Amino acid sequence: MRAWSVTRPGPVEEDPLRLVERPVPAPGDDELLVQVRACGVCRTDLHVTEGDLPVRRPGVTPGHEVVGVVAGTGAAVADFAVGDRVGVAWLRWTDGECRYCLRGSENLCPRSRYTGWDADGGYAEYTTVPAGFAHRLPDELDDVALAPLLCAGIIGYRALRRTSLPHRGRLGLYGFGGSAHLCAQVALAEEATVHVLTRGADARRLALELGAASARDAYELPPEPLDAAILFAPVGDLVPVALRALDRGGVLAVAGIHLSDVPPLHYETDLFYEKELRSVTSNTRTDAREFLAEAAVHGVRATTHAYPLSQAPEALRDLKAGRFDGAAVLVNDLS
């Protein structure tokens, strides 16, 4: 099969991805072999490709928003059959026995492994996934529409829950890419007032089309104090900006796996009045299942831009440059 490999992490403008030939992977006893139909392009893929995240698997194939069909099963798999449509997400494996897993916080498992970082992902014709971490997908959506839900949607959902947003509360979203525009739809369906603060004119336009109450530049103040905010942009300079926009008792959740350095915070203006700053680390399988169920009920839809899989480097460059709103999805054209 053909697959993209991060042969030399570095700026995407310098072509760190290479198209390589590899054998179709054999699933382990508890794994599924998945023929990839579509794979979303996530900012985490950019961090893996450019080396912002340390190399865990040399030459890894990125991609963890995978929609595909089961092409083979390991000997111990009983719950899936060849031909089933499944999703492969970021969280690939946890040990199930550490104190974090046992208390329901498997996203904090110290031995956790991730698709497209620890193991080869979906920028390829085939990938594998432990059956216990594969997701059954709703029939209502096509492959391209589903792909961004499998990470952008899930992590946005967890970030929203981390904010403890009150019912009909005022939510600020800093950055409005693949994850934020899905998170906004869930928040709006739950009767929140959503204010979007982002650099791109196209992203601000999309925010207003989806029902946001306002859309401004990321460094501007929203039109009213916020009960909660989520920082999706990997820009540490925005942390104090977002904290100052919070009302008393407000919570800022940082949703990204990578963030540039945060400047010094001033206690009186940034954190006083019981404001809180929280991080978001991956997700649990429960988060994923809850979000996929809510997405089906509320009609959450990704704004997508399809690229053939052969143009994966171009999709990552466009993501970095902010050349599209919503989410990019690679469609397998390598057969």
Image (tube, grey):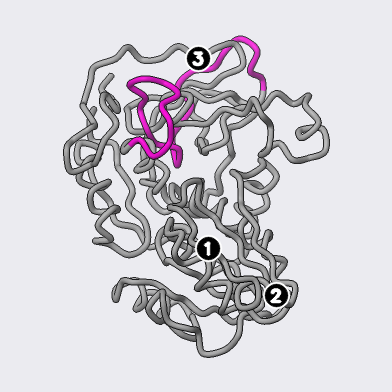
Taking the magenta stretch, the answer to whether it contains residue 135 is no
Q: What is the spatial separation of the Cα atoms under label 2 and label 3, in whole angstroms?
A: 52 Å
**Is residue 197 in view?**
yes
Q: Quadrant of the N terminus?
A: top left
Q: Position of residue 298 (x, y in %)?
A: 59, 67
Residue farthest along the left direction in this orientation: 14
Mark 1 and mark 3: span between their CA atoms? 48 Å
Is residue 75 a member of the stretch shown in magenta? yes
Place residue 208 in its image quadrant: bottom left
Find the distance from the CA under tag 2 to the CA under tag 1. Answer: 14 Å
Residue at label 3? 27
The percent position of residue 19, horizontal first and vertical second, equals 21, 26
Name the disc covering residue 264, or none.
Answer: 1
**Toward the viewer: 54 or 155?**
54
In the image as oriented, which residue stretches furthest toward the bottom?
A: 223
Neighbour class for label 1 at 10 Å: few (<14), some, many (≥20)? few
Residue type beneath disc 2: Phe
Q: Earlier in the sequence, mark 2 or mark 1?
A: 1
Indicate the amino acid at tag 3.
Pro
Tell whether 269 sits left or right of 302. right
